Structures are given as C-alpha cells and as structure tokens.
Amino acid sequence: MLVLNLSKPYQPNSAPNVTTRMLRALGLNTIEELYNDIPDDAKLNRPLNIPEGKTEGEVERLIEETLRQDLAPEPHQCFLGGGIWTHYVPALVDEVISRSEFYTAYTPYQAEASQGMLQALYEYQSLICDLTGMEIANSSMYDWASAAGEAGRMAVRITRRRKIVALRNCGPQRLDTLKTYCDAAGVDVVVVDYEHKKGCIDYSTLKEKVDDETAAIYFENPNYFGVFEEQAEEICKLAHLKGALAIVGLDPTSLSVVKPPAEYGADIVVGEGQPLGLYPNYGGPLIGIFAARGGQKVFRQMPGRIIGETLSKNGERRCYTMVMQTREQHIRREEATSNICTNEALCAVAASVYLAMLGSSGLMELGRRIMESSHYAAKKLGEIKNVESPRFTPFFKDFVVRFLQADPEKIYRNLPKYGLVGSQPLGKDFPELSDSALFSATEVHLKKDIDFLIHSVSKEVEDK
Amino acid sequence: MKYRQARWDEPLLIELSGEGRCGLTLPFDPELSREVGDVLETIPKNLRRADIRLPQVAQPQITRHYIRLSQMNYSVDSGTYPLGSCTMKHNPKIIQRILANTKVRKIHPEQPDEYTQGLMKILFELGTMLAEIVGLPKFSLQPAAGAQGEFTGVLMIRAWLKDRGQLNTRNEILIPDTAHGTNPASAAMAGFKVIEIPSTEDGLVDVEAIKAVAGRSTAGMMMTVPNTLGLFEKHIKEVINIIHEVGGLMYYDGANLNALIGRVRPGDIGFDIAHLNLHKTFGTPHGGGGPGAGPVFSTEELGEYLPKPTLEFDGQRYRWCYDRPKSVGRVRSYFGNISVLLGAYIYCLLMGRDGLKDASALATLAANYLMSKLDRRYFDLHYFLNIRCKHEFVASAKVSALEVAKLMLDYGVHPPTIYFPITVPEAMMIEPTESESVEELDNYAEVLNKAAEVASKDPKAAAEAPHNTATPRVDEVRASHPRTLKVRW
Ligand SMILES: Cc1ncc(COP(=O)(O)O)c(C=O)c1O
C-alpha cells in the first residue's frame, strides 16, 4: 500500500477506501504493482533521507524561527541598488497577483479559456513599448541579465556577425551573463573600459573597438554607477555606421525622466522590471524586459513569448492569443530563437498594474522623487569629512561614493548595526574603485531616513 | 456540468484612460525638495524626456479591470487542468501565506551574508533535500526555469569537454524524438549539434539507433524519464552505459519526476547532471506562465562546473562561493527565484519523505485510472496495452485533437496538452496529478469521451466550439499573419 496509510489533505485519493477502489478498477492489489515495469536494479531500496512531513502550522513556525535572526530592513532602510531597488509596492499590485485565477494558471495554451492572462500580458507589452518607444516587446524574460544575453544572440542572428562590444561600466552580473550566453554560441564579448574620471563611456576608446565584425554594442543608460550616458545617441550612431545594432540596458524607472531609447537610436532595449512593483526578494523572481524595433524581419528573431490581438473566428470579438510561435522551441526545436519556455508572466502582470497605477503624471513624479532622494543623499554624504560624493555625475538613482580614509568594506559590513544596508563596495569588480561604494536612494527614502544614513555613515567614517 | 466563464467586454487599460486621473500618490518631502533644487535640470538636455503616454486610470477602475480579467482566466483553482508534462497539482495555500508574509521579501541580495544566515540555511537545506531526491550531490539553485536548467547543464557538459580537450571533436548531443522542444533548443544554444534519436513501436527510445550514432563525436545525451509518453524507459541503464562507454555524459530532464520520487533516483541509475522543475513537481504555482525555478544537480566530479556562486556550508556559516575557476559562469543575476525556492522548501517540509513518495504513487494511480476510462473507439492507447503508464499518458485521438480540446472547454475543464509529443498523431497528453479526486477523474473521462464523440459525429458543432468561454474560437491565423499581426496597442 502507500507508505502512510492515512488520508492526506492535498491528495483526495489517499483516503484508503478510495485508493483501494481505484486499484481494484485497474485489477491491481497494491500500488507497487504500478511500478512493475521498472527494473529492480533501477529502484531505490531505502527511504529517502528527508525529514518526516509536518503540519502547516509547524512549517509556518519553523520558517519563522529559522529566519528570525536575519536582518530584513524596511524599504526606507535599504540603500542598496545596482540591479534591484526598493520602491513602494502598492497594495493593489499584491492583490492582483494574489488572484489564484492568475497565479495557478499555466501558460495560456488554450486562448479561449485564458483571455484574462493574455490581455494582461498584451497590455504589459504595450506599456513597455510606450515607455521605451519600441515597436515590439515580448511578454518577459527571466531577468535583465539573461535578457541582455538573449539580446546579444539576437543581434548575432540579425547581423550574422560574431562579436559583441560591451561597456565595462555595465552591471558586472549582467556582463557575466552576457558572456555565458555568447560564449556558448562562439560569440566574442569584447569589454571596453570606461572613462575612469567620469564613470561614463569613453567614446574614443569605444570607437576603436567597433568594427565590421561587430554585431552589437551593449551599453546601459544610466550605467551601473547610475550615471547618464550623455553620448548615447553618438554611440548608437557609431553602431549603425558599422552595420551593428545598439542594445541598451536600463532600469525602467529611469524612463520617467530619460527619453525613450528608440529616440536616441536603440535597436533592442533590455532591462530589469523589478522596480515596477516587485519586492527585492533576495534576488528573485525578477522580470527581464525585452523590446525591439525594425519591422517584422526583426520581430521574427525575437526570443520569448509574444501575445497578439486578433478576432474570434466568427469575427465578433476582439481577443488575444500567443503569436509568432514558429520562432519558439516547441515548434522550431533546435532552430528556435531561444530555449525559453516558462518565463515571468505573473511579474509582468505586476509591472503592468504598477505602471497603470502611476500613469503618465505619476511616473514623471516618480522620476523627480527618486532624483530628489538620491541627490540629497549624495550631497549629504559628500559633506562628511574625507568622503567624496557623488564621485560621478550626472546621475539618476544609484551613485558612487568615495571614501578617502575609511574602508568601504567596513562601512558595508557595519551599517546593519544601525538597521541599515547600503554602501556596496565596488573594489571586487572595479579594482580602480576599491576606495568606493555604490549607494542608491528612491522615493521611499524621506529626508529623515537619509539623515539617519548620513549620521550612521559619519560615525563609521570617524570611528577608525 | 453546465459551465459559463465570465465574458466581460473589458476595454484595454489605455481605453480606460482619462486625462488627469491616477491610481497612486507618491511621498513628497518639501524640505528635501528645497535642499536639492530642480533635480531634473541635472539631466543632460539631449536625454530629457518630453512626454510620457501611459494610461491614466483611478484605482477603483484598475481594480475592476484586473478582477474581470482574472474572471476570464481558467486556473487549477478553478478546476481540472491536466496538462501533460506540466504537473498542474494543487498548490498548498500555506505556501502562499508564508510567501506573502515573509520578511524575505524585503531582503536585498547584496546584503552582507552574515545577516541572511537563516535564509541561506533554508536554501541550503532545500538544495540538500532535492539532491537526495535526485541522487546527485552537488547543486545550484540559480536557473530561473527548467529550460535555463537545461542550458546550464549542457554548458557544464561543454566546460567538461573543454577541460579534456575534446570540445572540438565531441559536438553532438543525442535527444529522443519524444523530447520537449526545450531540450534541442538548449543543446543548440550551447553550440551542440542535435542528433535526434527515434523511438521504437513501443514508445521507448531506440537503443539500436543510439548504438548506431554514439561514438567519438558524442558529447552526451538528454533524456526525460519517464518519457513524455508517460513510459518508464526500461532500457535506461543500458542507454546510460552506451553513452558513458563512448565517453559522453547523461543529462536528466526532471520535468517528469512527479512519477518517481522515492522510487527511482536519476543519479543512482547513472545520470550525471539533472534539473528539476520546482513549479511542476514541488507544489509551487505556475503563475500563468512563470516564475518557476530550475535548479541543477550534478555528480561530485562535475560540481566544479556549476554556475557561480554556489552555496557552501562549512559546518558553521553559509556563504556564497565565487571562487570557482571552472564554473560555466552565471546564467542570470543573483541567486535564483527565491520565492519559488522557498515555496518548494515549504512543500518538501509539508510532505516529508513518505508524503513525497506517496504523492508520486497517487499521481501514477490517477493517470492509470483515468486512462482506463477512455473510450477506445475514439482514443488509441496502444503504447499502454501491456504496460502501466507513469504519472501521465498520451492518447492518440482518432479525431482532431484540436477539436476535442476546444469542445472540452465548454465543460468547465481544461483540455490536455495537444500535439506533443510530435511523434504521436493527434496527441493528447494527459497528466491528472495526485490532486484530482476520483470523482473529478470520472468526470474528466466522461468529458473527453463525449467531446471525442461530438468531434467524430458532428464536425460542424466541433468547429464552432467553444461557446461558453470568455471568447468563442480565436482566429489564430489572423493573429500571426504578417498583415494582421498586432502586438501592442
Ligand atoms: C519535458 C519538459 N522538459 C522541459 C520543460 C521546460 O521547463 P520550463 O518551462 O520550466 O522551462 C518542460 C515544460 O514546459 C517539459 O515539459
């Protein structure tokens, strides 16, 4: 029989009389007989070394107890950024993605029964197009980093060239992932150094590295140091001049104040949708934004799922369904544009609710609030003795702070004593910035929160 | 059962928009504003945004919009949803509650390790439990879904070959023709040539065909066990021997593990690398398409190739280890889809050793029971004449699988996966899972049989179905036709 001869809450047929009835209907006596086809030498002949099952209440308590010692700062106590940021998550976002009609559905394979999810994803794609100025967006990638990897590969398919030029002032994890995705295809990623004094792209160095083997230039705007790339347009032009594509990586909240990348020449836009209504969640789930332009020839090279608007066959109703599936793995197999199947659909819905709530004026307001907080924090940190802040300008949300005397690593490790997190040391990825750290501030940080950060950092700087 | 799905004429968000409305207010600190002046002036002029076009909608209308959309979406919580290969089991609600309340939400991944020891302990214990289930000791929780796990796995094969100086000669990955599309797509993404292995009459991988192609150019083979027909590959040990003998590695696609937990461990029978789909087998929801999680497991020897960072425990402290010179690198940012991982951990604790094993048995029982109720006049089940299916089975409809599926929608159940695997004509792949009661299984069989009967006797009625869903039959051709393609408002 079953190992436990007990009815279990999640398995209706575990009631012993039901199990027996079902087995009888199959002419069987024991459940083991269902496994008669498996050779004995393939079977495990001992119980798994896993604890016995617990009740719901026990598990809830155990998790709570295990996590008790961990520090979980409130959003306004977190000054870390770099790819995940703390923003206010509206209650309605939580509410919508807690609807089990959404979260317990599978991918919308049967369009007629899945119109809700399909329309929500179509709206997400449209919102991303509105924000970025692009013609098409897919319904999500895993995260910004893997989206950058897929963008590199898409550029290789479009241009039939085998080199990606990427900027060193992009997020280190994004660059690592881009390399993983490209290496696998035998595509070189050439990383070009930035302007060390300013934190931005060094156009003349970049220019030397872009040639007619180059499939794309990948840069971020604002870059990893939070700095706006003033020469974004020139860089895109440079790419086009050489017959390459321009791939821009971004934090979508920056599009509250920065013009759509399509307007300065981007061909593919990737980014991290997490700040649009998702919690930091120790790094996941995230949502990779992926958008492009260039007409249907380009569309056919897109990775991932795309939802389209159509009509019912009887012509009476507007409706939605997955389109251009002949690009995808379930049809095209080894010829597919990507292997992605499960994506981050629910997170895309969260991002849409968030953007819909802000609306045009709310988003503009958000950009201003973010910049007010980050600029106030940067300025005040710079007033601390032996601290240079902001090290690079002009900047958006993240910024670099230089400690002339103190060790950034020590500040990073000690801030939690004040209940704060921030000051991510940059030396590991940027040896030339070993005296510096990355900070971030958003609309959740009020003056008093920032003043407390300043107070805490000053104490640490003074206390040597 | 008479079924009616909600059918709202729900406008698009942009059509709900009215000038001057908004759904959220933002904090404003006048003192702070004064301190910094007009920050927007600091943005380079050539980058400034002139205007933003987003919907302007107030909160009540946004709320209704999404509630209505949710009412037009079928889900596991609505009813039977036995998509083959997808393991649509019930997601215990305690998982959702813990995830909704947990402080983990607020933790930034760059926070110092010494302040996240509890969470890292949970992740480490999850990895260890799953490794015990798979029978492979080393793990990475990084991949975001099954396909990314596969990609990671084939990259590991690549790195291993490179180390041995064999990357140039061994460039072929063998994959059965019943495999999921992600397998060949992942192998190709890692630069391998895909060699498709046919299946025999009985639905199992053709061992002779493997022998014929396995050799010096073989990098490895990807297998799904039980395969996507729902059959245990009884020659699996022989297959693994062949591949190992020619010097290749074996990759296990764990999408179908829900048949086997506690009975067969892929590592024990010789697989070298494996992924699991936590959003299938381990009780976490599928999110309408994601997020999922696709952790990867390997032998001790191959552990050094796993993505970085790996999670290590020295008996006292947990830490993320970046010093991994042979690693395939990163496949994404940070550590993984944490909330899905945490959900799977909760699931494992709830079920425990025996519960996990029983769940697999009950899933297998449900599939066999359901199959026994299918009308053989309409469904060809010849693969299963002399053998028990595992957690799922594939019926070959003698009528159009598409029409059967569309007819079923009117009965308040979700049809099976159709046209996969591609080796079976009019394939209907059915995986009821351990969550469906015997009554629901009886009902599902009745609906399948009824729909097939209508499809065979009344093609006109079939072509018009469904009637009771949020929309009648969708025009898929129009949707993807270059002239009518519309992917944004
Ligand atoms: C057999 C099989 N392999 C791999 C996958 C891919 O997994 P995921 O969708 O999590 O990427 C799936 C699921 O869709 C599957 O059914």
Image (tube, rainbow, N blue to C red):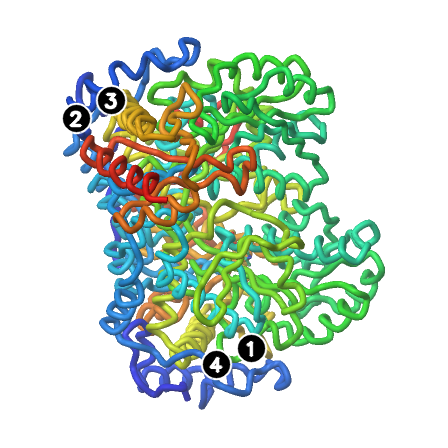
**How far separated are the C-alphas under marks 1 and 4?**
10 Å
Looking at the picture, how far across and down is residue B194, in whole percent?
A: 72, 51
Assess disc 3: are there few (<14), some (14-19) or many (≥20) residues with their C-alpha within 10 Å of its C-alpha.
some
Identity, as a three-letter code, of the amino acid under mark 1: Val
**How far separated are the C-alphas under marks 1 and 3?**
57 Å
Q: Residue at x 28, y 70 (%)?
A: A62
Q: Earlier in the sequence, mark 2 or mark 1?
A: 2
Judging by the rendered image, the residue that carries numbered circle 1 is B264
Q: Residue at x 26, y 50 (%)?
A: A98
Identify the chain of the residue marked 4, using the numbered disc in the image: A
Looking at the picture, how far across and down is residue A130, in whole percent?
A: 38, 22
Identity, as a three-letter code, of the amino acid under mark 2: Asp
Judging by the rendered image, the residue that carries numbered circle 2 is B29
Judging by the rendered image, the residue that carries numbered circle 3 is A365
**How far separated are the C-alphas under marks 2 and 4?**
57 Å
Judging by the rendered image, the residue that carries numbered circle 4 is A48
Q: Secondary structure at mark 3?
A: helix
Identify the chain of the residue marked 2, using the numbered disc in the image: B
Q: CB of residue at label 1: within 8 Å of ligand 1?
A: no
